[in-house]
Image: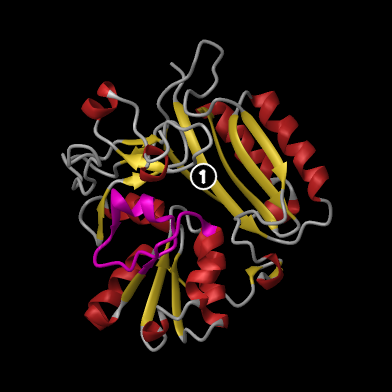
Amino acid sequence: MAIPKILLYYIFTPLADPDAVRLWQRDLCAGLGLRGRILISKDGLNGTVGGDLPAIKKYIRRTRDYPAFKNIDFKFSEGTGLDSHGHSLDFPKLVVKVRDEIVSFGAPGELRVDANGVIGGGTKLQPAELNMLVAERGDEVVFFDGRNKFEAEIGHFRDAVVPDVANTREFVAELDSGKYDHLKGKPVVTYCTGGIRCEVLSGLMKSRGFGEVYQLDGGIVRYGETFGNEGLWSGSLYVFDQRMSIDFAPEAAVLGSCQVCAAPTTNMRNCRDASCREQLVVCPECVALAAPTCEQHALTK
């Protein structure tokens, strides 16, 4: 029986010919029957793909055969299933693109990369090291969420600072606003889904005077795999595929609240307006009654 898997990965490394990498990755995934989304730039590779386990293993082996990607860190999670052709049900298609940034902060000129990764980023912490830091310094440690605000509605680190951003491009203005300047003398731990956004965010913070900046290596995914519901993480993790959210262990705390009826839920849905990219926390019962709409588009209907 085919086992569906989702693969999450990134690597920052200089690439001389991003378009050649795009063609190779597109053909490699298509040949293995993988679906998902891969972004490539002169600074590296960022992807999430799904398929059956044998195809995923071949993809990992062949991608690591490329010298620039030999140290890429792959993270696994369970997929929903496969269709009759063996394609992942969690992704509607395969998309492979070249972009200015593999994670869109709108600040490509601030990112510096060499063969060892991002230059000038935060100090990386493994999950156990993060727990040790908090044990040693207690409430002095500030968790800083590097995701979009809606992602934190269903799960976050305890007492985390959650910036009011709808996308990563808003982080630069948010940091420049001065509203977080009081944190510049504190140990700040940035975190995000798989670690990639914090690679950039921690560097942006350091260049703006935040003196002691850390980043959770491997992101929430690696931390959740290590500690489940027993660590400092609480709730569910939002993911950018058809699953919408995942839990690291049974009986995870339910932090989300339905925007319609206020019932506890982790259920996420897109705004029904086709032009809107906003994600909403809405319980299945309310979704069944009416497709959800964000506040902005509710006013225009």
Is label 1 in a helix, a strand or a loop? strand
Residue 162: x %, y % from top left:
35, 64
Q: Which residue is mark 1?
A: 8
Left or right of residue 10: residue 260: left
Residue drawn at (24%, 64%) of the image: 158
Coloring applied to the structure: secondary structure
Is residue 157 one of those drawn in magenta? Answer: yes
Figure check: 263 above or below 133: above
Residue drawn at (34%, 49%) of the image: 225
Instruction: Residue lying at the far bottom in this picture: please name it.
Output: 185
Q: Amino acid at mark 1?
A: Leu
Residue 6: x %, y % from top left:
48, 35
Figure check: 30 above or below 185: above
Residue drawn at (67%, 31%) of the image: 29
Q: Which residues are magenta?
A: 144-168
Front position in the image: 70 or 175: 175
Front position in the image: 1 or 5: 5
Residue 43: x %, y % from top left:
71, 60
Figure check: 195 above or below 263: below
